[in-house]
Structures are given as structure tokens and as C-alpha cells.
Image: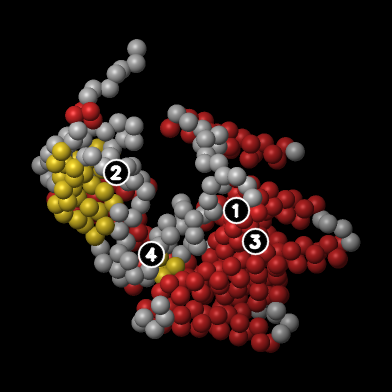
């Protein structure tokens, strides 16, 4: 029971930070959805799919499980070949990119189910040998079920960051199959996992670096302009503030005629009222490249719902630059100061 102090304490500290930063507690004011079979089953499937998408180590577990068969040595090269074939065929437009991403999503779901099955079989095998459910296994299973269940039932969406929370117990339990893994099989699975992780890491770095570069470029384009505003969250928000751009607040619009506004098109942003007239004057973007073809931002998966990564031919994002042409008088009235 003392262990419960850890998650309860972390939720308490997180809630305190919410209140200090946003004057609100996220846990108490999150979007509420009526729980029903459709929502819970969809969240469960999405959760398992996300698990399969971020766990290439499953190849090692699966190969270890089938290590008693000689053909197990061919398992990892076969899956790697199929993935390379799908990637090249999609890049060459032999396969429609939407179909290819559907294939990836199905593969992620199957992979997540395989990981779940290997974890359960690992517990069953140890229980059979010991003739009882070992306390350690029980704690690790409760970790997975409690954390996964909490996210599936109460999180407003399923994202990769939610699934990361169960990876440690999954590795502890599923990792027992690695004891049967041969050196050549271990080398194969490690090579595939590292390669995929490096490709996605480079793509993710390109995604983050885009906003760093474009914030600097925007500052150069608008050099000499004193009133430059920006909307948009995440990394762009951070880099835009570093360049001295003012952030539009959701509860107060201080735009004036002649100001400039920067708006990324691919991330969540504060809404600008429709009666404020904006004139597009420029834009900053970056064409798609091989470094971003396997994209982690295709579904904004770390903060939004969907599979964790997919094929993408879209540019990383586009930063649109607007000039404020007209602002209704009501937006320029001074706000009443509280005593």
C-alpha cells in the first residue's frame, strides 16, 4: 500500500503545477465523455495499437519464444524485408499512401496483441512452474492493468506518451523470453529495432528543428516590426517566445491594425475571431524529404490520438504570416482591472 503514495503523490504535484501554471487543475477539468462499450473498446484497440507502434523490441521477444524452431532465425529478416518493401513501394507510389498507412496500423495492432500475449504467457509459464502466482508478477500485472485501465477509461485520447507508462513492466515480464535468444537472432532483432528508432528519431528531430529554424527566419523577415504576434503551442510556442514574439491569449485579444501575426497550420493554436481581418503576406515552409518520410508528426501522435508514426508526403508544417488589416473597436477596449 505504501507504493500507492508514489502515483498519488505525483498526481498531487502535477495538479499543483497545473494550478500554478494555468490556474486550473487538469485532472478535475478534463473533457468528460460518457463511458460506453464503443468508446472503451475503441480506446482499448488504440492503446494496443500504440503499444505495437513503439515497441520494435517485440521481434526479440517473439524470436525468443520460437527459438526452439530453426526457422525462427528467418523471422526478423522476413519482417524487415516486408517493411522495406512496403516503404519503397509507398515512396515510389506503387502503393497508395493511405493504404500503406492502414497496413502499418494493422501491423501495429497485431504487434501490440503479440506483446500482450507474450507477457501473459510469460506469467502463465512461471505460475505453472511455481504452482502459484508469484508476487512480483502480480505487482507487475497490476501495474499494467491499473495504468492501462486508467488511461483507457479516463484519458480524453490515447497517445504514445500514455503507453510509455507500461513499457517497464512489459519488458520485465516479456523479457524472460530473451533467455532463449541465440546470438545471431539477438543481433538481427537489435539491428532492426535500432534502425527503426534512429530513423524515427531523426524524423522527430527534423519536426522539432523546423519550428526552431522558422522562428528565426520569421524574425529576420519581420525585422523592424515591433508588434508581432503568434499563435500555436508546443515547440513553436517556445521558439517564438525566444524571438520576442508576443503570444495571443485566448481570453484577451490585443491585436491592432498594422500588427503582424504568425500562425502555424499543422499544430493546435488559439482561435482568432473571424471579424478580425487578416491579410496573408508571406509563408515559411520546408518541402518533404526522405528524412521525414517516416513521420512522427503525421498524426501529432505524442499529444493527439492515432498511431505513433506513419508514412507522410506532407511538408513538416507551414508558418503563415498575416498583416492585421482591421480590428473591431471592442477588442481594443482596456480590460477592467480587479481591485
Q: Is residue 61 above or below residue 166?
A: below
- Depth check, mark 4 against mark 1: the one in front is 1
Q: Earlier in the sequence, mark 4 or mark 1?
A: 1
Res 273 visible: yes
Q: Secondary structure at mark 1?
A: helix
Q: Residues within 10 Å of mark 4 (few under 14, many from 20)?
A: many
Q: Nearer the viewer, residue 149 or 3?
A: 149
Residue 244, image quadrant? top left
Q: Of residues 280 and 313, which is closer to you in this image?
A: 280
The residue depicted at 48 percent of the width and 34 percent of the height is: 18
Residue 202 visible in the snapshot: no
Q: Indicate left or right for 318 with 141 as reference.
A: left
Residue 95 in the image, given as x and y percentages of width and height: 42, 81
Give the answer, above or below, for where 339 lies relative to 159: above
Question: Image point 34% across, 70% down: which residue?
Answer: 313
Disc 1 residue crowd, few under 14, some 14–19, many 20+, Cα 10 Å:
some
Q: Which residue is mark 1?
A: 39
Which of marks 2 and 3 precedes in the sequence? 3
Which residue is labeled 4 in the image? 203
| Gap between marks 3 and 2 measured at Cα | 40 Å
Q: Position of residue 168 (x, y in %)?
A: 63, 56
- Counting other residues with Cα less than 10 Å from the Cα at mark 2, is it few (<14), some (14-19), or many (20 or more)? many
323 to the left or right of 115:
left
Whole-angstrom CA distance, mark 4 to mark 1, is 31 Å
The residue that mark 3 highlights is 171
The first of marks 2 and 4 along the sequence is 4
Quadrant assignment, res 107: bottom right
In whole angstroms, how far apart are the C-alphas of marks 2 and 4?
A: 24 Å
Q: Residues within 10 Å of mark 3 (few under 14, many from 20)?
A: some
Whether label 3 touches label 2, CB < 8 Å: no
Label located before the other in sequence (3 or 1): 1
Residue 99, label in figure: none
Amino acid at each position: 500500500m505504501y507504493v500507492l503514495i508514489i502515483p498519488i503523490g505525483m498526481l498531487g504535484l502535477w495538479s499543483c503545477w497545473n494550478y500554478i501554471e494555468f490556474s486550473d487543475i487538469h485532472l478535475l477539468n478534463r473533457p468528460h465523455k460518457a463511458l460506453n462499450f464503443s468508446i472503451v473498446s475503441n480506446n482499448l484497440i488504440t492503446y494496443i495499437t500504440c503499444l505495437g507502434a513503439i515497441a520494435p523490441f517485440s521481434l526479440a521477444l517473439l524470436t525468443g519464444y520460437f527459438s526452439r524452431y530453426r526457422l525462427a532465425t528467418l523471422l526478423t529478416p522476413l519482417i524487415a524485408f516486408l517493411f522495406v518493401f512496403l516503404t519503397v513501394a509507398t515512396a515510389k507510389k506503387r502503393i497508395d499512401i493511405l493504404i500503406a498507412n492502414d497496413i502499418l496500423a494493422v501491423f501495429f495492432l497485431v504487434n501490440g496483441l503479440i506483446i500482450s500475449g507474450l507477457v501473459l504467457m510469460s506469467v502463465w509459464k512461471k505460475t505453472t512452474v511455481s504452482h502459484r502466482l508469484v508476487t512480483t508478477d502480480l505487482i507487475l500485472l497490476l501495474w499494467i492493468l491499473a495504468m492501462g485501465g486508467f488511461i483507457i477509461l479516463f484519458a480524453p485520447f490515447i497517445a504514445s506518451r500514455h503507453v510509455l507508462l507500461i513499457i517497464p513492466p512489459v519488458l520485465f515480464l516479456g523479457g524472460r523470453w530473451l533467455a532463449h535468444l541465440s546470438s545471431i537472432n539477438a543481433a538481427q532483432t537489435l539491428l532492426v529495432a535500432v534502425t527503426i528508432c534512429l530513423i524515427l528519431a531523426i524524423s522527430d528531430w527534423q519536426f522539432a528543428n523546423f519550428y526552431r529554424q522558422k522562428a528565426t527566419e520569421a524574425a529576420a523577415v519581420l525585422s523592424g516590426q515591433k508588434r508581432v504576434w503568434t499563435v500555436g503551442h508546443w515547440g513553436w510556442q517556445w521558439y517564438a517566445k525566444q524571438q520576442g514574439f508576443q503570444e495571443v491569449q485566448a481570453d484577451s485579444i490585443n491585436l491592432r491594425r498594422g500588427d503582424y501575426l504568425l500562425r502555424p497550420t499543422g499544430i493546435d493554436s488559439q482561435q482568432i475571431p473571424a471579424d478580425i481581418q487578416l491579410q496573408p503576406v508571406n509563408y515559411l515552409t520546408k518541402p518533404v524529404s526522405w528524412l521525414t518520410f517516416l513521420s512522427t508528426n503525421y498524426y501529432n501522435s505524442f499529444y493527439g490520438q492515432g498511431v505513433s508514426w506513419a508514412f507522410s508526403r506532407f511538408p513538416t508544417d507551414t508558418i503563415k504570416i498575416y498583416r492585421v488589416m482591421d480590428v473591431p473597436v471592442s477588442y481594443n477596449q482596456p480590460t477592467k482591472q480587479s481591485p
